């Protein structure tokens, strides 16, 4: 574990509106939103530089970087991982920590709720989901994250429960009285929560090797799916059809 003088940085780019947080030891110094209009690919490293300069911190003084892993924006996640690795290459003593975005979002749940089901990456009626319960003023995962429909998610959630996501998979109609849908504005992951979770993981020595710092993808990226569809061999071009034509 690093001492209390170590500066640490959190990067959240899983959502369209990214953000950064800077801390020193266990003290959070500042959080800033990344400019949406510039997008993560051109706004991230300049944003890190601006935040650090505002607090007199050099790249060599950054001892730890915590990165939101997704699921989320394909480009945002890739840029965040590449930027974190670049920073670690420039500073050999820097350590990295990957933080799952489901865990980040769970921390947005209001204090009056004891459990929450969190949804990300909604497509075709399912989402990447996790279930968390409040324990000692923090949240613990109780169900392995995975792709689930809302019915499947509620079947493994304790009751009463809150549900968080924007958007959400199709909700049951009528919605059970012991299920509360939280406001959509709470479904934005924030760098402050990434920082707090990253700090806890770092204190436990749960660092991530730069080669293992990879995004969590609920599904194959859309570009990969489209490529597969366009390049998948057609039935007419298979060897089986060629043999049939030869026999004829």
Image: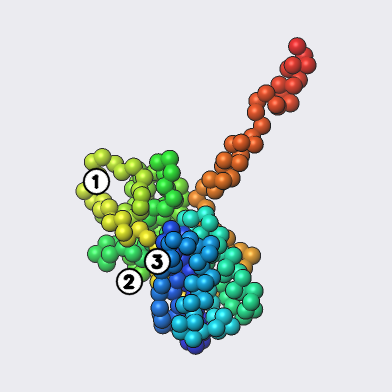
Q: Helix, strand or loop at disc 3?
A: loop
Say which of 65 and 3 sits in front. 65
Place residue 113 in its image quadrant: bottom left
The residue under the point 61% across, 41% down is 227
Quadrant of the frame with the C terminus: top right
Q: Which residue is mark 1?
A: 176
Image depth: mark 1 or mark 3 in front = 3
Q: Helix, strand or loop at disc 2?
A: loop
Q: Earlier in the sequence, mark 2 or mark 3?
A: 2
The residue under the point 39% across, 43% down is 149
Label 3, residues with CA under 10 Å away: few <14, some 14-19, many ≥20 = many
Residue 61 at x, y percent in the picture: 55, 84
* Above-or-below relation of 207 to 59: above
Residue 245 at x, y percent in the picture: 74, 16
Q: Which residue is mark 3?
A: 190
Q: Are marks 2 and 1 in contact (CB under 8 Å)?
A: no
Residue 210 at x, y percent in the picture: 62, 68
Q: Are marks 2 and 3 in contact (CB under 8 Å)?
A: no
Label 2, residues with CA under 10 Å away: few <14, some 14-19, many ≥20 = few
Q: Which residue is mark 2?
A: 137
């Amino acid at each position: 574990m690093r001492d209390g003088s170590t500066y640490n940085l959190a990067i959240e780019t899983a959502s369209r509106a990214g953000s950064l947080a800077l801390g020193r030891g266990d003290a959070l110094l500042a959080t800033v939103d990344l400019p949406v209009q510039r997008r993560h690919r051109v706004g991230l490293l300049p944003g890190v530089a601006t935040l650090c300069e505002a607090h007199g911190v050099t790249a060599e003084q950054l001892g730890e970087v915590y990165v939101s892993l997704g699921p989320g924006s394909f480009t945002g996640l890739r840029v965040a991982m590449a930027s974190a690795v670049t920073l670690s290459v420039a500073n050999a003593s820097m350590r990295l920590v990957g933080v799952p975005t489901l865990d980040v979002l769970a921390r947005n749940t209001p204090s009056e709720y004891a459990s929450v089901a969190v949804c990300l990456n909604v497509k075709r009626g399912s989402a990447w989901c996790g279930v968390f319960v409040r324990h000692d003023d923090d949240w613990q995962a109780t169900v392995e994250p995975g792709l689930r429909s809302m019915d499947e998610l509620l079947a493994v959630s304790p009751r009463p429960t809150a549900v968080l996501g924007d958007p959400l998979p199709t909700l049951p109609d009528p919605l059970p009285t012991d299920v509360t849908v939280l406001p959509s504005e709470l479904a934005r992951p924030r760098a402050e929560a990434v920082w707090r979770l990253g700090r806890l993981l770092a204190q436990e020595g749960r660092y991530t090797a730069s080669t293992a710092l990879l995004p969590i993808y609920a599904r194959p990226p859309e570009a990969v799916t489209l490529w597969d569809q366009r390049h998948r061999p057609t039935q007419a071009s298979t060897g089986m059809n060629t043999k049939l034509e030869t026999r004829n």
